[in-house]
């Protein structure tokens, strides 16, 4: 797949699990949310167990924007977008990482921030995002269900739905929806308690709809943004490199799904593999979890960036 070189990638996190308005650690790359309204401290972005980002890509003096995921609650990402002054009418494409509600819950309110004449943009997703019913099975008597996310909901808002398991170019080839991620590593085994029903039969859910997006920063390599990386962040990075033929990884950010007892055993191996892949920046977010994030920071302190709701990261060529 041809992935065009771009001059700048800006990732504005509309929702993540963490916020600290007095961090005061801004740099040329890291821009934190401002709590001020005029000279009064009255604005705060919301942190929730969800992920949503507005990705702005600049090439040849022109900037295009992509919305990637919508966060958890109905209002959280939309509230943050307003506080942050993010103009949803700049959105030229939409992509969804997978169909779980911590990435779809804010869809309607975010969509309503886009004027109706702009809602003809492509909404790109794996067809598996519409799988229903879908649930986490903690035992025969305890199944916790994900709310339904439907094709009708997307189409009724006016978007052009593109369903694909394959890689799909976005923003005139300046970004790439990776499509279905091959599961090749020997340690990234997916989410064992995830299930769905098909024709009344219970099946283990491989979360095949899980995917990420990639950009090619001129002279520096791939900039990757994942939602949850249920396919495994190492699988995801290898797939992006294989698809594009680009070996360097400049930045990888997003959820790596290493939180909790089911995934903590693979934290050390994941960090080992990240070291081999040698990204310049690693930005764990959302479902990566405290232990994994601390491990990444401890092992690769010069590469680690702490993400938050409201943070804008600017990667320039």
Image (cartoon, rainbow, N blue to C red):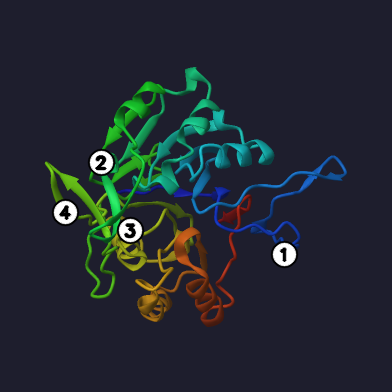
Front: mark 1 or 3 = 1
Front: mark 4 or 1 = 4
Residue 99, position as x, y percentages in the image: 34, 45
- For label 1, the SS is loop
Is 78 rendered above or below residue 207? above
- Spatial distance from mark 4 to mark 1, Cα to Cα? 46 Å
Is 167 rendered above or below residue 152? below
- For label 4, the SS is strand
Residue 258, position as x, y percentages in the image: 41, 69
For residue 159, what is the image quadrant?
top left
The residue pinned by badge 2 equals 132
Front: mark 2 or 1 = 2
Residue 109, position as x, y percentages in the image: 52, 31
Identify the residue at image location x=40%, y=47%. 4
Residue 30 in the figure: left or right of residue 106: right
- Spatial distance from mark 1 to mark 3, Cα to Cα? 31 Å
Q: Are marks 1 and 3 in contact (CB under 8 Å)?
A: no
Is 229 rendered above or below residue 104? below
The residue pinned by badge 1 equals 25
The residue pinned by badge 4 equals 203
The residue pinned by badge 3 equals 240
């Amino acid at each position: 797949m041809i992935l065009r070189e771009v001059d700048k990638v800006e990732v504005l996190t509309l929702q993540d699990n963490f916020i600290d308005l007095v961090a005061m650690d801004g740099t040329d790359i890291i821009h934190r949310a401002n709590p001020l309204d005029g000279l009064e401290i009255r604005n705060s972005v919301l942190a929730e167990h969800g992920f949503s980002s507005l990705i702005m890509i600049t090439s040849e003096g022109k900037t295009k924007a992509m919305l990637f995921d919508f966060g958890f609650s109905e209002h959280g990402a939309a509230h943050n977008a307003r506080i942050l002054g993010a103009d949803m009418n700049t959105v030229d494409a939409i992509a969804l990482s997978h169909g779980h509600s911590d990435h779809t819950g804010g869809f309607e309110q975010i969509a309503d921030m886009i004027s109706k004449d702009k809602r003809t943009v492509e909404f790109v997703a794996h067809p598996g995002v519409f799988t229903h019913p879908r649930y986490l099975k903690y035992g025969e008597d305890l199944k916790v269900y994900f709310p339904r996310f439907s094709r009708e909901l997307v189409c009724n808002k006016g978007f052009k739905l593109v369903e694909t398991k394959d890689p799909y170019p976005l923003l005139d080839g300046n970004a790439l929806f990776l499509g279905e991620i091959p599961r090749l590593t020997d340690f990234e085994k997916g989410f064992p308690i995830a299930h769905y029903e098909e024709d009344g039969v219970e099946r283990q859910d491989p979360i095949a709809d899980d995917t990420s997006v990639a950009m090619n920063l001129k002279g520096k390599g791939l900039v990757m943004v994942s939602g949850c990386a249920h396919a495994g962040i190492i699988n995801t990075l290898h797939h992006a490199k294989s698809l594009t033929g680009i070996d360097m990884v400049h930045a990888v950010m997003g959820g790596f799904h290493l939180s909790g007892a089911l995934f903590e055993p693979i934290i050390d191996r994941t960090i080992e593999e990240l070291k081999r892949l040698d990204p310049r920046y690693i930005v764990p977010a959302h479902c990566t979890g405290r232990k994994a994030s601390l491990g990444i920071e401890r092992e690769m302190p010069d590469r680690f960036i702490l993400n938050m709701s409201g943070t804008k990261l600017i990667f320039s060529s």
